[in-house]
Amino acid sequence: MSYVCDIRNLVMNKAEHFDESLQELAKFSKVLSHPARLAILKYLAEAKTCISGDISGYLPLGRTTVSQHLKELKDLGLIKGEIDGLKINYCLNCKRIRQYLQLYEDFFLEIRKQDSLC
C-alpha cells in the first residue's frame, strides 16, 4: 500500500522537478487555456475600467460558471476583485500580466534564436 502512495506522490510532484519559471508559465498557460477566461480578460481590457457587478451578462455562460472562471483568474493574480458593498469590482492586474508576458518573452527568445536543421 505504501508503495502505491509513494508512486502517486512522485507522479503528483513531477512538476517540482522543473525550473520555477517553467512552472509559472505552465500555470499561466493552464489558466489561459479556456476561452471563457480569455473572453473575461478581453472584456476587462476593452472596458478600460473596473467592472462592478455581474460579468456573466456579457458571456454566454451561467453566473456560477463565470464565477469559477473569475476565481481561476483571480487566484493567479491576473485580475483583482475588490468587494464594494454587495458588489465586486473586477479589473485587470496589469502588473502581474506584464510579469507573465515577460516570462513568455524570455522563454520564446531562446526558441526564436534557434535555426532548425530539420
Image (cartoon, grey):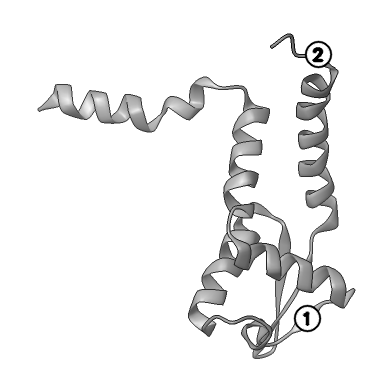
Specify the quadrant of the image occupied by residue 48: bottom right
Residue at point 69%, 69% (across, down):
39
Q: Which residue is mark 2?
A: 115
Query: In the picture provided, is 114 more to the left or to the right than 57?
Result: right
Determine which of the numbered discs, if any, sits on residue 95 in the image: none
Which secondary structure lies at badge 1?
A: strand
Residue 42 on image: x %, y %: 77, 67
The one nearer the camera, 118 or 44, is 118
Q: Amino acid under label 1?
A: Ile
Q: Amino acid under label 2?
A: Asp
In the image, residue 56 above or below residue 15: below
Query: Between marks 2 and 1, how big is the CA–CA gap?
Result: 45 Å
Name of the residue lying farthest toward the front: 118
Name of the residue lying farthest toward the left: 1
Please state the total of marks drawn on the protein image. 2
Residue 73 on image: x %, y %: 64, 60
Which secondary structure lies at badge 2?
A: loop
In the image, residue 95 above or below residue 17: below
In the image, residue 27 above or below residue 1: below
Specify the quadrant of the image occupied by residue 115: top right
- Of callouts 2 and 1, the N-terminal one: 1
Please name which of the two marks, 2 or 1, marks the residue nearer to the observer.
2
Q: Are marks 2 and 1 in contact (CB under 8 Å)?
A: no
Q: Which residue is mark 1?
A: 51
